[in-house]
Amino acid sequence: MTIDITTALNNIIHPTIGKNIKAMGITSHITPVANGFDIILTTPFPASFLSSIFLPLVQDTLNKSFAPKKIKVRLVEDIRVHKTQLSGKKLKQIKNTIAIASGKGGVGKSTVTVNLATALAKAGARVGMLDADIYGPSIPLMLGTATLKDAPLQSNQPVIAHGLQTMSIGYLIESDQALIWRGPMLAKALIEMLDNTKWDALDYLFIDLPPGTGDIQLSLVQKIPLTSAIVVTTPQDVATLDARKAIKMFEKTHIDVLGIIENMAYHLCPNCQHQSHIFGHEGGQALAKELQVPMLGQLPLDIQIRLQSDAGQPLSNSSSALSEQIMSMAFNVALTLSQKPLQQNNPFPPIKVISE
């Protein structure tokens, strides 16, 4: 019977991503009990991503297939530590460190970072965010924490906002103050800020890098243990040209490129729902196919993203079709990362049950 249940589990396909539990890296533990079986499915990503669609599908399928046996299915998550480009090295209290980069400014890199991070936090992960875009730190504004000053500098405690642990140079300087620092000084300051911040047991830390592929970016990616990097672009040729350079930079420094996110992929008319491709059509997808890296998601050019970013309220925390799109993108990011090689000697505690 246990073998039959295992076979049945492997035949259940997630309706939106088209993968079974084996392809998603999910392991199953089947325990015979009175009148049935208890099944624990252990996911290497936030388990709540499966609780609304996949878990009910699994439960219903097994109940119908093995009636009158009573089968109870529970989800358990075990977010693991994946290896970095610096062999055997990782940041203290941080399982996975992901750089968010862009080849040029103005493509919405910081907006993507904020919404991706808050979506994973909403899914139940422990998430941090470091604003390394030191010349233009916008994370405090987007999180509604721009008025906080001095406290992070004095205590090295991250600022908590929308379920995230955050740190930014924007917390330490006035909003109209320009940092006239040279590259080596900036890189040193950022690495010290990263090391000195008292992060509290993070599953994921997102680092919002400065745009481009210059001296600062190179210094950071060579000295910070990174699990992976995500490159943000828009569909237009001038953006994908520079995104290609960012991907090549990561490849040359032996950093895994998790994939590409295409921002401003289209404009959706609020009246008739017609899609207009203002900045070109599927340039990010073409780049992903050319360089053989995953396409992690697309976000539209939408006024709600701008309004809520300016208001310090990430859209992923709302209930809307666009929020669902962001959550789907976050699931794709977590799932793709979970399939990367693991770091050896995982020091983190065992799994926890989060839903049943």
Image: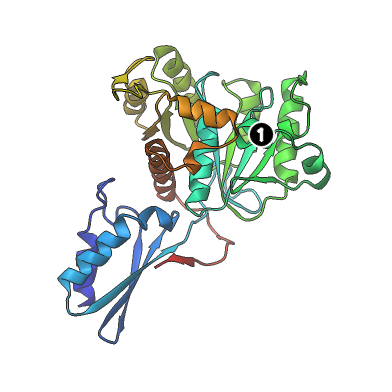
Asked where in the image residue 191 lies, by quadrant, the reply is top right
Is residue 148 rendered to the left or right of residue 133? right
The residue depicted at 22 percent of the width and 58 percent of the height is 12
Give residue 297's position: percent from left, percent from top: 38, 34
The residue depicted at 78 percent of the width and 29 percent of the height is 173
Is residue 170 rendered to the left or right of residue 61? right
The residue depicted at 49 percent of the width and 37 percent of the height is 315
Residue sticking out furthest to the top: 238
For the question of whether residue 222 can be seen, the reply is yes
Residue sticking out furthest to the bottom: 34
Return the residue nearer the eye: 258 or 351. 351
Residue sticking out furthest to the front: 271
Return the residue nearer the eye: 24 or 140. 140
Is residue 268 rendered to the left or right of residue 147? left
Asked where in the image residue 296 lies, by quadrant, the reply is top left
| Callout 1 amino acid | Pro
Give residue 49's position: percent from left, percent from top: 39, 52
Residue that label 1 marks = 140
Query: Which structural element holds mark 1?
Result: helix
For the question of whether residue 228 can be seen, the reply is no
Give residue 41's position: percent from left, percent from top: 36, 65
